[in-house]
Structures are given as structure tokens and as C-alpha cells.
Amino acid sequence: ALSLFPSMARHGAAHEPELCSLCLQHLPAQQLGVCVDHLGHRACSHYFHFLCLRRVHPQNCPHCRTAFDQCAHVPSMLEEPFAWARLIATGYDDSLSRKEVSDALKATLMLAPDEVEHLVASRWQDWANSGALLPSSRVQIMAESLAHRLPEHAPLPPEALMDSKREHAGQKRDPPGTVC
């Protein structure tokens, strides 16, 4: 049988890292972005490449169609652990669930989803200090234990971090279907 994605046909999707649904490239290969509301909280639980998500108009999540106000760049968990935790949380709590951490790491690490699940399951008690939730104060501990697995990305240029609403207010948009 022919497959549109030959590498997935050969190796199986379960053995590949998560993909950006907008450009179909590995999520860990570029800086991540998430949909946020007017208060800067997650509008939904999906991850994309930041530069791909910036091009989504109207601003509705490409997966679940939830409206969002801005796309937010997910900072490095090593360099900005509290900011990272705030953007990983899908609620208003400053502690993260195992699912939130697992989903974030699936988007961050160049590992297959089942490998990330195993990693989180095996390390959760250490990271969360035997608790059900990972307090944002312990994200640095988790990040340090994963430092050797974290991808290194070139910093985004300042203009890439501009507010996506202001940026597109008067500028010409890419035509639909433009590759990210």
C-alpha cells in the first residue's frame, strides 16, 4: 500500500516524534508555540511550531478550532522554568499534571510518544516529589534531569516574538496553503 508519509510506513508513526500538524515536520526540530487567551493562559492543549502557528488566521486552533488571542512562544524549561510551566498548564493552577508534562515533553523531545510516556512514568515520583502534581517550583529539577535530551534551538529574532495581532493588523497575509 502507498503511504503519503513513507517514513511512517517504514517505521510506523509510533516510533516517530510528534509532528507539527501545520508543516508535518518533527515538533522538537523548532521552537514551540501554543494558543493563548487574552490573559496569556492556554486556550487549548495543542502544540505547534511557533513560526507555523503565527501564520494561522483566523486565530482558531487548527486541531480543535478553539479561538485564541495570541500565539505564545514556549520558552526553554532550563532557562525559564516558571514561564515554561505557566504555558504548559492548561488550567489556572501553577502545578502541572502528569498528562500536561507528558504532552509537553512529547512536543519537546526527539523521542517517540511511547518512549516519552515511559520516561515520565519512570521519573514522575522524583520530579513531583512523590506528589500527583508537579509544582512549578520543581520544573527546574525536571529540566536538569532532561538537559541532555533537550534540543538546542537558535534564538528567535525579536520581530518573531511580536504580538501576532499587531503584526497582522496591517500586513499582507500569506495565501492559504502556504508552506510554513
Image (cartoon, rainbow, N blue to C red):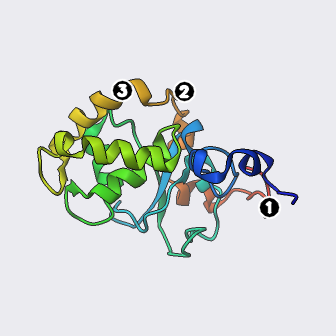
* In-front residue for pair 141/55: 141
- Report the Cα–Cα distance between label 3 and label 2: 16 Å
One can see residue 162 in this view: no
First in sequence, mark 3 or 2: give its number: 3
* In-front residue for pair 130/57: 130
Quarter of the picture containing the N terminus is bottom right
Residue at image position (69%, 45%) is 11
| Amino acid on which disc 3 is placed | Ala
First in sequence, mark 2 or 1: give its number: 2
Are the two marked residues, 3 and 2, in contact with CB atoms closer than 8 angstroms?
no
Q: Write down the residue under mark 1.
A: 177
Of discs 1 and 3, which sits in the foreground? 3
In the rendering, at what x and y percent does residue 28 appear?
Answer: 54, 40
One can see residue 167 in this view: yes
| Amino acid on which disc 1 is placed | Gly
- Tag 3's secondary structure? helix
- In the picture shown, does residue 48 fall above or below 122? below
Is residue 91 left or right of 5 when viewed as pictured?
left
First in sequence, mark 1 or 3: give its number: 3
Residue at image position (26%, 36%) is 142
| Amino acid on which disc 2 is placed | Ala
Q: Write down the residue under mark 3.
A: 147
In the rendering, at what x and y percent does residue 152 appear?
Answer: 49, 26
- Tag 1's secondary structure? loop
Q: Write down the residue under mark 2.
A: 154
- Report the Cα–Cα distance between label 2 and label 1: 26 Å
Q: In the orientation shown, which residue stands out farthest toward the left?
A: 130
* In-front residue for pair 1/28: 1
In the rendering, at what x and y percent does residue 169 appear?
Answer: 61, 61
- In the picture shown, does residue 92 fall above or below 152? below
Is residue 180 left or right of 137 when viewed as pictured?
right
